[in-house]
Image (cartoon, rainbow, N blue to C red):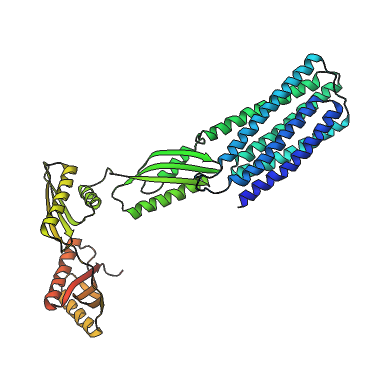
């Protein structure tokens, strides 16, 4: 909102300044018969038209995207700048024709007095102020329309100096000085138009800003999880940088992890460009360090299957793969067998027909039924039994014991401690023995869930 107010207020002030100075130069130019001063007045009149167009355009260009303008309205600034360029060329052509006519006919020099010099000095001061204010606003808001306006007024300063030189030559007796100064103004206007046209056309044909592709690519590649940037395109629409990229991400990442990569990529691009609109398309690819187990998990995930206990034996000449596949416990065997066969075929397509695949089908662990906490006495009884089973073994400090009654039976949760250097396999074996002993002693216990942790520091 602030940038919009800055652009419109600066453009509005320029309208009044352009109108006042154009009228003053035109009146004095007519009065003394100076083609150079009249040409500069016409140049200022074009600037006035350009400023009015700029003031109108910047009020629209910052409007957000809508159903008909998906990239916003920023291109209006480029179109307005192109229209002003056309006006400049028309003006430059007219001035050159008139200058040539006066030089050919030997038109008498203008009447010299202090008035035109005073007007031109004031014009130089005003234009310097306007060019600086517009340049600051254009840089802050990245407005092409304001940048074009600033360039106009900077050129006006050079044009005013050319007119002063022409009037001085006329005062010294060189009758051609005024017409030559007018021709110089026309050449400056044409050069300005050429510079503006080049920049505007590049924007309209979606030429990427210099260095933008490299900067955007570096920003996206800096995001953890991005393997590489496959394609990246940049275009400018008004002050907004639109970036469209296809980035490679690990295919083993879950969807929420990929979404986090996208979010960080947006943040990195915003930091690099200030005002950017990023379209991020992730492409899952296999990493060089992907293991056989990783690849099998991807195959199962893509098929929507729940697998665990994936073991891989590499015999050199072939692979032997064993998998536990979980399916609905109520599913008929033939349907479950078809799912297992499909999984086996998918693995063979990935690794070759000679790979041996054995799939163990087991019922999917059901969700725990609704339950209520057991009484404190029951919890103490279970906790005492757990401590007895763990006594003298590698597992100790049974704590945080919880017991819940459900329709399916009792659910027991507990924490325990083990030696930090003990392997996970050994910890699992010892804890599993305790769990089996508890279920044997208490047949009402349906499930035991343990959590092993190292001793407190």
Nearer to the camera, 432 or 453 = 432
Position of 381 relative to 55 (above/below): below
**Which residue is at the far bottom?**
377
From the viewer's perspective, tell me whether residue 448 is left or right of residue 195. Answer: left
Task: Tally the numbered discs.
Answer: 0
What is the quadrant of the C terminus in the image? bottom left
From the viewer's perspective, tell me whether residue 426 is left or right of residue 16. Answer: left
Q: Quadrant of residue 178?
A: top right
Nearer to the camera, 183 or 162 = 183
Position of 12 relative to 333 (above/below): above
Nearer to the camera, 329 or 265 = 329
Q: Quadrant of residue 398?
A: bottom left
Viewer can see residue 112: yes
Which percent across, then down, holds residue 337?
A: 12, 54
Which percent across, then down, holds residue 416?
A: 23, 71
From the viewer's perspective, tell me whether residue 115 is left or right of residue 46. Answer: right
The residue at the point 68 percent across, 45 percent down is: 10
Which percent across, then down, holds residue 65?
A: 52, 47
**Which residue is at the far front?**
68
Viewer can see residue 400: no
Q: In which quarter of the image is residue 305?
A: bottom left
The residue at the point 22 percent across, 49 percent down is: 299
Which percent across, then down, holds residue 30?
A: 84, 29
């Amino acid at each position: 909102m602030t940038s919009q107010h800055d652009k419109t207020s600066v453009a509005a002030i320029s309208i009044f300044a352009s109108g006042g100075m154009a009228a003053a130069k035109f009146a004095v130019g007519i009065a003394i018969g100076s083609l150079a001063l009249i040409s500069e007045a016409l140049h200022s009149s074009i600037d006035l038209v350009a400023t009015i167009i700029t003031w109108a355009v910047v009020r629209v260009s910052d409007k957000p995207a809508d159903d008909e303008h998906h990239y916003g309205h920023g291109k209006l600034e480029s179109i307005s700048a192109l229209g002003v360029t056309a006006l400049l060329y028309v003006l430059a052509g007219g001035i050159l024709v008139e200058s040539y006519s006066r030089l050919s006919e030997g038109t008498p020099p203008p009447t010299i007095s202090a008035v035109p010099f005073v007007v031109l000095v004031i014009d130089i001061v005003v234009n310097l102020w306007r060019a600086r204010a517009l340049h600051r606003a254009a840089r802050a808001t990245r407005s092409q329309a304001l940048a074009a306006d600033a360039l106009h007024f900077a050129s006006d300063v050079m044009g005013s100096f050319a007119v002063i030189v022409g009037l001085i030559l006329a005062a010294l007796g060189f009758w051609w000085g005024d017409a030559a100064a007018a021709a110089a103004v026309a050449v400056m206007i044409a050069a300005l138009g050429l510079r503006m046209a080049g920049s505007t056309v590049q924007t309209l044909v979606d030429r990427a800003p210099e260095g933008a592709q490299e900067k955007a690519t570096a920003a996206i590649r800096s995001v953890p999880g991005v393997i590489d940037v496959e394609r990246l395109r940049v275009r400018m629409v008004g002050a907004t940088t639109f970036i469209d990229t296809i980035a490679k991400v690990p295919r083993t990442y879950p969807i929420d992890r990929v979404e986090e990569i996208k979010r960080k990529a947006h943040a990195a691009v915003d930091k690099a460009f200030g005002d950017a609109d990023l379209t991020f398309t992730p492409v899952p690819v296999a990493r060089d360090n992907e293991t056989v187990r990783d690849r099998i998990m991807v195959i199962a995930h893509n098929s929507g299957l729940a697998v665990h206990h994936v073991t891989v034996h590499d015999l050199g000449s072939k692979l032997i793969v064993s998998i536990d596949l979980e399916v609905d416990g109520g599913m008929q065997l033939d349907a479950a067998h078809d799912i297992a066969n499909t999984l086996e075929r998918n693995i063979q397509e990935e690794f070759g027909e000679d790979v041996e695949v054995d799939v163990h089908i087991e019922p999917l662990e059901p969700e725990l039924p609704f339950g209520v906490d057991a009484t404190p006495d029951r919890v103490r009884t279970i906790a005492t039994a757990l401590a007895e089973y763990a006594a003298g073994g590698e597992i100790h400090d049974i704590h945080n014991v919880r017991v819940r009654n459900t329709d399916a039976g009792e659910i027991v949760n507990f924490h325990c401690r083990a030696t930090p250097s003990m392997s996970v396999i050994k910890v699992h074996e010892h804890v599993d023995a305790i769990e089996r002993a508890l279920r044997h002693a208490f047949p009402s216990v349906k499930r035991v869930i343990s959590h092993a942790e190292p001793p407190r520091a």
